[in-house]
């Protein structure tokens, strides 16, 4: 073989390994998430996860005759499409890297999936979204309810960690079933399946375009990009809220803060220039809904071992615990949201809408949000050096 051609093939092989197999640096993942958040909002809507899960849960209960109103179309509703895209992209990334495998948890972890998934569903319904919609995209949309959920998430993560330490001392975990033996043919087939899914996503976009649903097709591709990035960078918001209390590590929290700053800046420009509606994703959850919902969701994150987006992409790696948690997440969010919508009292207690530029203007809003995020950055950095906030076992 020609030496130049051989060198070229080596470079291609190394590049493929870096992109599709090797874990990406967390900072790269966070920056890409922030950029994709802005791109997705520019294209159609903010990034979200639980909205799609709720549509799926609504369809299940509608099919059982428990709901009267017909939910949004599974393949057309943007909430459903973006979550479908996330799962599609995450599964493709997992298969392309040859990392997909069913992993059955021990009995206690299975029980925690049931409890944790339920808490994720209830908490996200109260807070107006999961860690993505209720926290990340809400703050990006310049809504004060995102900060209410942030406070709740911190409290819930702290309480959840205290419980996990108690559990380690008092409850037997049990043994997980032995993993199935790897079959060489299946292992070799996985990357091809991953590539088939990626190409299938492009084909699906073409199908949407052919049917006149160009926006929905783009939303699907955006969701796929989120799923791929999350899986390759192992990006999970649960770690950002857990690690400062558990080990003192600040890296993931710092990355989330930087990612959020990118997203906030992009959203602010789009809203300030009138390219996107000022009220978009400004939810009426500032108050009890954001605080209590965030706390419940934060505790649930520690039970399941993943946030809303983290539970979704880890389920796509074949982790049975997260698959169960994701199913409970969807069902309980649907039921809780239906209960809230059916009660005027509950809707009032959940909170109210606060769009920060209405009170501060765009310049001061950007300054106050960035100052708050920088203070959070400084706090976790200080804690990493001192360990003052680390929970004792």
Image (cartoon, rainbow, N blue to C red):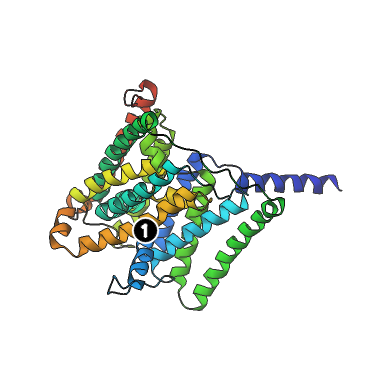
The residue at the point 38 percent across, 44 percent down is: 112
Q: Residue furthest left?
A: 345
Q: Residue furthest bottom?
A: 211
Q: Residue furthest right?
A: 1
Give the residue number, with chain letter if any, for mark 1: 330
> Can residue 175 be seen by looking at this rendering?
yes
Circle 1 SS class: helix
Q: Quadrant of residue 247?
A: top left
The residue at the point 29 percent across, 70 percent down is: 66
Q: Quadrant of residue 79?
A: bottom left
The image shows residue 262, relative to residue 244, as above or below, that is below
Q: Residue furthest top?
A: 386
The residue at the point 29 percent across, 58 percent down is: 281
The residue at the point 59 percent across, 48 percent down is: 99
| Residue 202 drawn at (x, y percent) | 57, 66
**Residue in front for this viewpoint, 248 or 225:** 248
Q: Which quarter shows the C terminus?
A: top left
């Amino acid at each position: 073989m020609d030496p130049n051609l051989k060198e070229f093939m080596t470079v291609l092989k190394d590049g493929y390994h870096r992109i599709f197999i090797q874990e990406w640096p967390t900072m790269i993942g966070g920056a890409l998430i922030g950029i994709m958040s802005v791109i997705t909002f520019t294209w159609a809507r903010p990034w979200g996860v639980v909205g799609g899960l709720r549509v799926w849960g609504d369809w299940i209960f509608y099919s059982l005759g428990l709901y009267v109103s017909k939910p949004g179309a599974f393949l057309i509703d943007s909430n459903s499409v973006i979550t479908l895209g996330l799962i599609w992209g995450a599964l493709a990334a997992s298969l392309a890297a040859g990392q997909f495998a069913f992993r059955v948890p021990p009995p206690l972890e299975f029980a925690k999936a049931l409890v944790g998934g339920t808490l994720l569903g209830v908490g996200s319904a109260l807070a107006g979204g999961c860690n993505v919609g209720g926290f990340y995209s809400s703050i990006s949309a310049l809504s004060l309810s995102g900060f209410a959920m942030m406070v709740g998430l911190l409290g819930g993560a702290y309480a959840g960690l205290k419980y996990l330490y108690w559990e380690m001392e008092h409850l037997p975990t049990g043994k997980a079933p032995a993993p199935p033996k790897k079959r060489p043919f299946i292992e070799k087939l996985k990357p091809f399946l991953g590539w088939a899914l990626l190409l299938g996503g492009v084909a699906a976009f073409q199908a949407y375009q052919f049917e006149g649903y160009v926006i929905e097709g783009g939303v699907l591709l955006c969701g796929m990009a989120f799923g791929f990035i999350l899986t390759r960078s192992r990006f999970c918001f649960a770690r950002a809220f857990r690690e400062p209390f558990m080990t003192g590590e600040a890296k993931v929290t710092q990355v989330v803060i930087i990612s959020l700053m990118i997203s906030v800046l992009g959203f602010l420009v789009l809203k300030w220039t009138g390219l996107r509606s000022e009220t978009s994703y400004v939810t009426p959850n500032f108050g009890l809904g954001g605080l209590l919902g965030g706390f419940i969701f934060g505790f649930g994150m520690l039970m399941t071992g993943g946030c809303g987006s983290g539970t979704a992409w880890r389920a796509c790696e074949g982790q049975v615990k997260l698959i169960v948690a994701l199913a409970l997440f969807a069902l309980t969010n649907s039921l809780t949201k239906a209960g809230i919508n059916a009660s005027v009292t509950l809707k009032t207690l959940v909170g109210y809408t606060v769009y920060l530029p209405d009170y501060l203007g765009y310049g001061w809003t950007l300054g106050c949000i960035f100052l708050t995020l920088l203070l959070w950055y400084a706090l976790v950095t200080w804690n990493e050096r001192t360990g003052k906030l680390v929970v004792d076992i």
